[in-house]
Amino acid sequence: MSSKPIATSRSATGVPTGRLAVWWVLASEVVIFGGLLASYVIHRMGHPEWHAAAAVTNTWIGAFNTFVLLSSSFTAVLAHQAAEHGDGKGAARYLMFTILGALIFVCVKAFEWTTEISHGYTITSNGFWQFYYTAAGLHALHVIAGAIIMGFVARDAAKGRELHRVELIGIYWHFVDVVWIFLFPLLYIAK
Amino acid sequence: MADSHHPNYKKIYFTLLALLVVSVAGPFLGIGWVTLLTAFGIALVKADLVVQNFMHLKWEKRIVKYILGASVALMVLFYGAVAPDVQKHEGRNWTNDAAAAAVARGIPGSHAEVAHEEAAPAAAPEGHAADSAAPPAAPAAPAGFDAAGAYATTCATCHGPAGGGDGPAAAALNPKPANFSDPAFWSSRSEAELHKAIREGGASVGRSATMPAWGSIYDDAKATALVAHLRTFRK
C-alpha cells in the first residue's frame, strides 16, 4: 500500500538502496578525481620547474579552507546523528551550518582566485596553473552542488520528512571533504 | 545494525584539526622527507578518519568496500600504466624533447617578476653591445624588435646572459648549450644553420634536440636579428 519509491524500501545487498546508490556515485567520483590527481602527480614529478608556480599558492588560505570543510563535515555527521534520533529540526539546523561552511569555502575561493588571476596567474599560464584551476574548480563545483542539494534535504528534514536523506547527503559531503584533504597538500603544501 | 553506530564525533573532529595543524607546520622544519610525511602521510590519516567514522564505512557492508576498493585500484592502475611514459622524459628508444625543453626553459611568463629580475641585468650590457658593435644587424631587425631583450628572455636561461653556454639551466643539459663566445663555434656553423636552429629547433640541423623551435614567436626577420645579436658575443 505504500507509495514510497522502491529506492527507499527495497534492498538486495543489505545496504539501503539509496545509500548504495550514493556509494556508486562516489565510486565513479573516485575515478574522476583520482584520474585528474594522478595526472597532476605524473606531470608534477616530471616537471621540477613547476615548483616556481606552486610557491605562489597561499598555504594559509588553503589551510583555512581545510578547516572550514572539516568543520562542515563535523556538522554534517551531527545532522546524521540527530536524524537517526528522529530529530528532524535538529538535523536541519546542523545541515544549515554545513551549508554555511560551503558558502564560506566558496567565498574564500573566489577571493583567492581573484587575487591570483589579477596577478596574472591564469589557467593558460602553464601546466601547474591548468591543474590548479581544473582540480580546485571541479572540487568547487561539487561543493556548490552539494550545498544546493543539502538545502532541499534540510527543508524536508525540518518538517520531519525523508530523514534518511540526511545521511545520504552527508556521505557525499564527507567525500568532497576527503578530496580537499588530498588537494590541500598537492596544491598548497608541496612547494 | 550499521545505522546505530555513533562514535565520539567531537573527539574525531579535534583530532582532524590537530592533524591539520601538523600538516601546515611540517614544511617550516625545512626537511624534505618530514614535509612529505606531514603533508601526504597525514592526508591519508585524515582521509581514513573521515571515511571510517563520518562516512561510517567502518560499519558498512563489505560490498561497499569492494566497490570503492575497485575504483581506487583503477586509479592506481591508471597511474602505474601512464607514469612510465609521461613522468619520465626518456626511455630506451625514445625521448620526449618537448617536455625536456619545457623543464630546461623553466616557466616563461608565469613568474613575471622573476623573469624581469633575470632579464634586467642581462639586457642592459647586451643592448649596449648590440647598439655599438653590430650596426649592420639594425636594418634587418623589424621595427621595435629588441634582440637583446628577446635573447635575455628566451635564450639566456640555457645559453647564459653573455652567451657563454653557462645559463642557470645549462648544468642539467647534456649535450651542453652552445657557447657563442667561443670562436670555434663560429667557424663550425653557417649563419643559415643558426637561423634554422632558432626557427626549427636544434634537431633540424642535427644538433641537440633540447634546443626548442622558436619559429612560432620569431619570424625570419627576428631570427636574423637574433643571429646578428649572437655574433656580438664572439670573442
Image (cartoon, coloured by chain):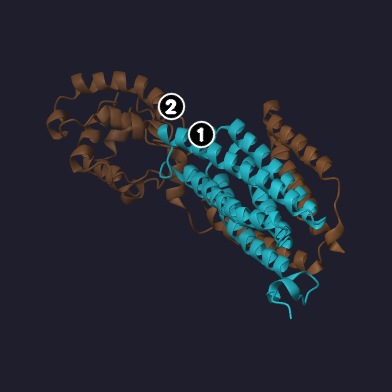
Would you say A119 lies left or right of B193 here?
right
Q: Amino acid at mark 2?
A: Val
Q: Which residue is mark 2?
A: B114
Q: Amino acid at mark 1?
A: Ala
Q: Chain of mark 1?
A: A
Q: Which residue is mark 1?
A: A52
Where on the picture, by quarter, is residue A74?
top right
Residue found at x 71% / y 26%: B29
Residue found at x 73% / y 77%: A2
Nearest the eye: B126 or A88: A88
Nearest the eye: B46 or B132: B46
Q: Chain of mark 2?
A: B
Crowd around label 2: few <14 · some 14–19 · many ≥20 (10 Å): few
Residue B192 in the image, given as x and y percentages of width and height: 22, 43
Q: Secondary structure at mark 1?
A: helix
Residue found at x 70% / y 56%: A157
Q: Chain B drawn in what color?
A: brown
Residue B229 in the image, given as x and y percentages of width and height: 25, 29
Evaluate if marks 2 and 1 touch, with contact meaning CB atoms under 8 Å apart: yes
Q: Secondary structure at mark 2?
A: helix
